[in-house]
Image (tube, rainbow, N blue to C red):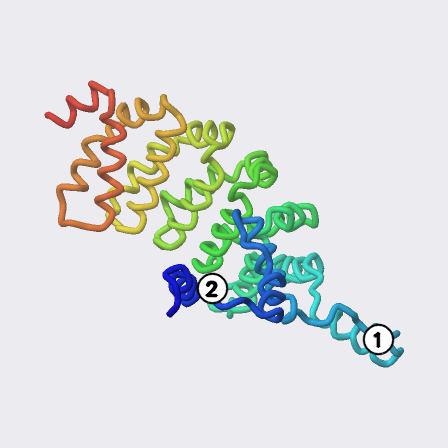
Amino acid sequence: MPSIEENKSEVAGAICAAPESNNESQAVSQQPRQPTNLQGLLRFAMEATKSEDAPSDSQFQQMDEERKKWLEEAIKSMSVDVIQVLQKQIEILKNVNEIKSDDDISEYESAINIILDHIDNIDIACDFHKIGGFMILYPCLKSSHAMIRSAGCELLAELCQNNPYCQQVVLDNEFIPKLLDMIEKDENILVGLKALYAVSSIVRHNPEGFNQFIHYNGPAILLTTLSKGDDRFLKKATFMLSTLCDCEPDFKSRLVFLEYVPTLISLVSKERQSSHEFVLALLASLVEDNATAINECRN
């Protein structure tokens, strides 16, 4: 009969884990160490997937002349000489002042659109001036065709957007009074919108541009055009004025003096339009810390 000690030994042996085989031990030891941080996790992932990597050895051979020539021609056909493209469009637009009212203007519109595709790059916009591109701007703004005038304003706006070099060129050549005149007098609303876009691109965050805007009665001109009631124009005009109020502290007092407050109140008193949000934002900006504007609202 087995002793108590022998029984205990058998029971203990029954619940012990089976000894590891040599193969299992080697498999465990070959596993990468468990990561404890992000760098370790990256190393763990790279080691664990090493077998899936592509072979590192590459076979390079010298390209034969025929294949080399084909590749050079393919690359050349895909590349574009932007300056050459712009010069070609400038040549087309040099004749824009000769367009008659019944002429087909599709070629000129296409030329402006091609230029617009490239000058959103600031360096290209500066190069556009250096190759004589600005010489076509005034003729476009004076065109008898509304579409050419609006496209010219858009081109001017895109050239000046966040571009101090082009802004200075435009200011030196006094485009501001011409654009303000178009905003005030052009009967085509699209031309007025694009001219306003150009003015905004020139004067915002530009002290000299802002001073010219004031000098040429920009605030008074915009006040009279607000009465046109076009929803799109109201949005853009009031948004620009709100931005100028934020940038130029004294500008608020100027607008209050010009009696903007009654005009803005009159606009929001009409049938609800999407532009009312922008009108109210400008009104709120004017009455902030301004007793005169607050009294005008109360009256």
The spot of residue 123 in percent (x, y) is 64, 47
Question: Identity of the amino acid at label 2?
Answer: Ser
Q: Report the quarter where the N terminus lies.
A: bottom left
Q: Quadrant of residue 73?
A: bottom right
Residue furthest bottom as drawn: 66
Q: Report the quarter where the C terminus lies.
A: top left
Q: Secondary structure at mark 2?
A: loop
Q: Residues within 10 Å of mark 2 (few under 14, many from 20)?
A: few
Residue furthest top as drawn: 291
Q: Is residue 158 above or below residue 32?
A: above
User: Disc 2 vs disc 1: Cβ atoms closer than 8 Å?
Assistant: no
Residue furthest front as drawn: 1
Residue of label 2: 101
Question: Identity of the amino acid at label 1?
Answer: Lys
Relative side of 211 to 270, left or right: right
Relative side of 284 to 176, left or right: left
Q: Secondary structure at mark 1?
A: helix
Q: Which residue: 49% across, 47% down? A: 157
Q: Which residue: 59% across, 65% down? A: 25
Residue of label 1: 68
Alpha-carbon distance for marks 2 and 1? 53 Å
The spot of residue 15 in percent (x, y) is 40, 65
Residue 145, label in figure: none
The spot of residue 14 in percent (x, y) is 41, 67
Ranked by sequence position, the earlier of labels 2 and 1 is 1
